[in-house]
Amino acid sequence: MSPVKRMGIVAALVCAAPLASADEAAAEPVIPAPEFVYCTTCHGIDMGGNVVLAAPRLSGMDAWYVARQLRGFSKGWRGVHPEDAGGHEMRPMAAMLSDAEIAAVAKYVSRVQSAPPAVTVDGDAGRGKALYASCVACHGPAAAGDRELASPPLTGLDDWYQLEQLKKYRAGILGSHPDDSYGQQMRAAAALLADEQAMADVVRYIATLGAQ
């Protein structure tokens, strides 16, 4: 890939929306983007996601978490299992980014805004509340996450994506790499959910927290 196209990927994310104040813009030079490609193509310029492409909503996600996930793809902790089709697409995208570029992408994602995720998963929120008790220690009672525990907020995520991730953790498609300690924790947590309906119930309850 040419240096121009490679920088275009990062510049597209950094420059896709006028999020910075005038002072911030003066302090942070803008790299002209020759084209908007890759990340914005799937996730959208506002990082609102696209369910048709199985690309989740990323806007507002904590920068530290975005950076960690990109490094996970780059290092081969994610996107290597034969059944992780979405991960296979993400891994080469992350692998070509430097640490500085990962930081720039993560910063953009954390600052851009999009519409709140729609509720699409059919589950029993009441039953999900009881099941969510095992998630509270890491993600908190309001699913707001805890950086000290490396747990991201859950309320801004698409419910369909959360359900798919839980299924992948439970099946060992995610969280199997020996260096992915946080993924292993999530795999163990997903194993506590008896079946797909239990996962849907938890996800549906999380959606009620996001609406509060």
Image (spheres, rainbow, N blue to C red):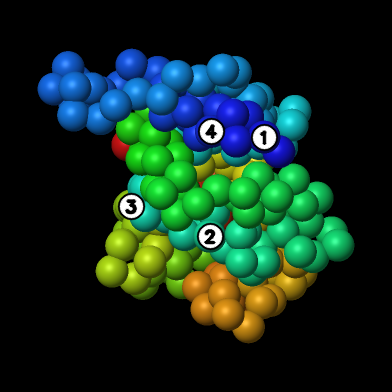
Q: Identify the residue under disc 1.
A: 2
Q: Nearer the viewer, mark 2 or mark 4?
A: 4
Horizontal side, residue 158 vs residue 167: left or right = left
Spatial CA span between label 4 and label 3: 33 Å
Residue drawn 40% across and 18% down?
A: 17
Position in image of residue 54 (x %, y %): 71, 37
Circle nearer the N terminus (4, 3): 4
Which labelled disc corresponds to residue 144?
Answer: 3
Q: Secondary structure at mark 1?
A: loop
Pick whichever of labels 1 and 4 is earlier in the sequence: 1
In this picture, is 204 found above or below 53?
below
Dot in front, 3 or 1: 1
Say if 124 sits above or below 23 in the image. Answer: below
**In the rendered structure, which disc, 3 or 1, sits on the residue that comes first in sequence?**
1
Q: Mark 3 or mark 2: which comes first in sequence?
A: 2
Task: Give the structural element (helix, strand or loop) at label 3.
Answer: loop
Using the numbered discs, state the Cα–Cα distance from disc 1 to disc 4 in whole angstroms. Answer: 9 Å
Q: Please give left or right for residue 82 compared with residue 193 in the image.
A: right
Q: Which residue is mark 4?
A: 7
In front: mark 1 or mark 2?
Answer: 1
